[in-house]
Image (cartoon, rainbow, N blue to C red):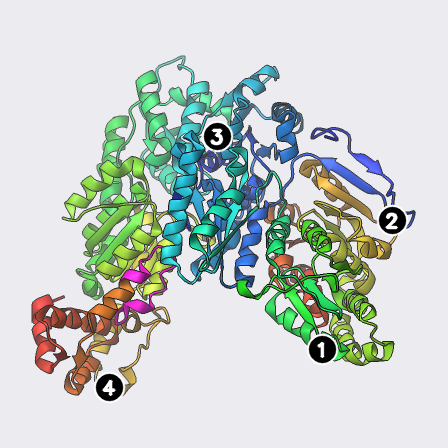
Amino acid sequence: MDGLPGHSPVLTASESGCDSPPVLRERGQREVFCGLTGIVWLHRKIQDAFFLVVGSRTCAHLIQSAAGVMIFAEPRFATAIIEEKDLAGLADANEELDRVVARLIARRPDIKLLFLVGSCPSEVIKLDLSRAAQRLSREMAPAVRVLSYSGSGIETTFTQGEDACLAALVPEMPHSDSASPELLVVGALADVVEDQFRRVFTDLGIEKVSFFPPRRAGELPAVGPNTKMLLAQPFLADTARLLEARGAEYLSAPFPLGAEGTTMWLRAAADAFDISSSRFAQATDAPRARAASALSRFHDQLTGKRIFMFPDSQLEIPLARFLARELGMQLTEIGTPYLHRTHLAAELALMPEGVALSEGQDVDRQLDRCRAYRPDLTVCGLGLANPLEAEGMATKWSIELLFSPIQGYDQAGDLAELFARPLVRRTKLRV
Amino acid sequence: MQLTLWTYEGPPHIGAMRIATAMKGLHYVLHAPQGDTYADLLFTMIERRAARPPVTYTTFQARDLGSDTADLFKQSARDAYDRFKPQALLVGASCTAELIQDDPGGLARALDLPIPVVAVELPAYQKKENWGAAETLYRLVRSFARAPEAVPARATCNILGPTALGFRHRDDLREIIALLAQMGIAVNVVAPMGASPTDLVRLPDAAFNVVLYPEIAQSSAQFLEKQFGQPYTKTIPIGVGATCEFIREVAELAGINPTPFLEDANAHSPWYARSVDSNYLTGKRVFVFGDATHAIAAARVAQEELGFTVVGLGTYSREFAREIRAAAKLYGIEALISDDYLDVEEQIAALQPELVLGTQMERHISKRLGVPCAMISAPMHVQDFPARYAPQMGFEGANVIFDSWVHPLMMGLEEHLLQMFREDSEFSEAPSHLPAAAPAAIVSSVAVLPRPLEAAVAEVVTQHAVIDVPGWTAEAERELGKIPFFVRGKARRNTEKYAREKGLAMISLETLYDAKAQVGR
């Protein structure tokens, strides 16, 4: 343990080289979602999977508060709320869980993959969901496969929930003996973005491409020694580690945010597949020009503006790199809940000088720093946005950056617009 | 374990947050894991509060469990005191911290802070949000209220109940304060909204208490009655009738004559209800669901002040099951007491009301079923915090209720015109401001109801497979088309039900009218 909240933060120079900026590490109150929140987008991505949180009323309340109206569509998530009597004995809790799952499956025969999702209370009472998943899987095979992962707040921060979920799927992936290289794109992307990338890979001449997670539980891609793994999201530490253990080769690249990030991300794949630079140019010149033109509309609004980011999704550093390099924004402090030095190496190399990076959080101290910076735009969670607006500061909800398609060339303009909108709105209002 | 997709109430510590956030000079240190801070957004986003709730979370992580979460709590409490300098500290645990059994109360007291510490134990695996709010307010009142030095003046009262994240609490409070001021009654303390711990000390300086929301304030009022001899009001002033009763009750307690205050020049709703255009409201079938206070009040207003027929009444507040059952008896119906929205949906679908008065969940259910709906109760939606003044209580509250319940319905004149011109081709499809899903399409085929999880989809499907839907002769189908669209679905369903009961495979013109005679409205 490196200190209790309120104790002096530690400022350390990075060990990875003098080109990386120093990172302020803090421990204190974290104003972030837990990993359960990932269910909100994961259940939409894997269309025949169901997510059953084994938790408390707080867990159910969190998901309904975070998911908003999505719950009224055709929700493929629910909470098994632990009650007083379940705490008395774990044997009974397991029986109760079996009963709840049986009832759920009886009513939702369309479910092919069921995730039992651990929560803070289930972890603390040591309810072993992986054993429960094995037991239930045996009973319900072959109709339903049951897996488990933890989305608990004591173990996961927000997007780490997706990492835990995908990590649980890795052992289920078939083995690939392919003699030729195969590309595996890892991390949930909006379907429209996935389709765009698939077209670019085809244009590049990379034929064997799969996306993980798949849209249907039965379509898990294979992995093996000839798998080249390209991360689409920066928060997949465990998933990547398990895929590497199954032979996949990690391709280091910045993340596909903005025209530059997308180009470098695609190039990492192209290089691994020995695609010629002329072919690369042929496949990417047109969409890159389109992205540049879309971005040019936002230079006036964003260039020179100072931005501050509270930690939220681990997307902060790639986003800051995009905003600084492609839109000329000035970075003040960029916070991230967790900084993965390897997966972010290519990003850190591109960060402009003078940026203050912070990892972890002590929200009250961070708010003090934010107020002292007086940035033009602050990226923060829903709990902080209106209070900061009331203090006269323009804010952007970070959660929108998770729920909107932002990756790739054709979303670069949309991504810039998300940051420009709060500023534009302020110039319009006369009240 | 309870399988749920959605809950009407949050966990009990959310109730404690509603009290702490409503008050001034109080800070809540909550022993809770990372992630529980989501609760802040309820206040900053749904209620659009301009400040963060006065809550410090310890946000412990797995690695802390191995070492010392108790130290973490103590450090957080000390830091919160240093930074916020509150008059008093409220301490407690959320569901996960309850399992660790760190005893926040004992730990906070051991810090020897120069301010009072109030500990609340809220059993998260048994109780829910409103109970948590009531218990927190009760603990605070009990800790701070001190006997008065002089006998309170008779015409002084406290107002108990309004919280943060409450259904129209802000506007109800303004309305009731104005009403009391008109009556010459001084308000000593309003709690929890706007009160500081030092204000709670003065609570016994009033002669009586006005309880606006029993779910929140009843236990505190009972304590104050027992301890300091302060009686409290039992009438909830929602609707004109209840407002007048409330005025009489308050006048009695304050020792004044109520008569001058029973007539209010701005009370428009009684005349609107009597005006000729409102005839069409007669007997409209309404389904009412919400917290017990609002549901009971809404049923009375619906029946007595709008001339509706209450066909269903229910609540998710199990603590007030007795009260809601007694109210349901007045309308000759059985109360629905459930916190499972699928039960509620099922009953709404079965009763086919013409108007639903409910919470944001009933709004969504109604949207699906194509039934108009108005909101009467928490849980809260951002739409339930209107920018304008929109109380539920008092005479202005009755005006607001008239408008907000009647507007979702087809306007009276429009309905008459549609009746007159119903055979014109222009009127064959729904020319209305009702939700896009026309009721006809929905009630004619139960299978299209998107019933998410527990809604016995399987049962409905089997039912359809086993019992064939009777066919319609062309003549009967044409006649059905002459019936206005907004009742056509019900007519179709009733007729088919009648035909099935009679074992008829085909519905003729005669069957249609036989069914009409039999089933009636």
- The residue type indicated by label 1 comes to Thr
Q: x and y percent of residue B194 in the render?
A: 49, 33
Q: Relative to A42, is A210 on the left or the right?
A: right
Q: Could you classify mark 4 by the number of other residues whose Cα lies within 10 Å: few (under 14), some (14-19), or many (20 or more)?
A: few
Disc number placed over residue A20 in the picture, else none = 2
Badge 2 or badge 1: first in the primary sequence: 2
Please identify, in this view, whether the residue under mark 2 or under mark 1 is nearer the observer: 1
Q: Which span of residues is magenta-colored?
A: B443-459
To the question of a shared chain for discs 3 and 1, the answer is no
Q: In the image, is residue B513 part of the stretch drawn in magenta?
A: no
Chain letter behind tag 4: B
Badge 4 or badge 3: first in the primary sequence: 3
- The residue type indicated by label 2 comes to Ser
Q: Are marks 3 and 1 in contact (CB under 8 Å)?
A: no
Q: Relative to A406, is A347 on the left or the right?
A: right
Secondary structure of the residue carrying tag 3 is: loop
- Work out whether A184 lies above or below B185: below
- The residue type indicated by label 4 comes to Asp
Q: CA distance from mark 4 to mark 1?
A: 58 Å
Q: How many marks?
A: 4
- Work out whether A160 lies above or below B127: below
Secondary structure of the residue carrying tag 1 is: helix
Residue depicted at x 57% and y 20%? B108
Secondary structure of the residue carrying tag 2 is: loop
Which residue is disc 1 drawn over?
A202
Q: CA distance from mark 2 to mark 1?
A: 35 Å
Please identify, in this view, whether the residue under mark 4 or under mark 2 is nearer the observer: 2
Disc number placed over residue B195 in the picture, else none = 3
In the figure, residue B188 lies in which quadrant? top left
Viewer-proximal residue among B81 and A284: A284
- The residue type indicated by label 3 comes to Ala
Which residue is disc 4 drawn over?
B424
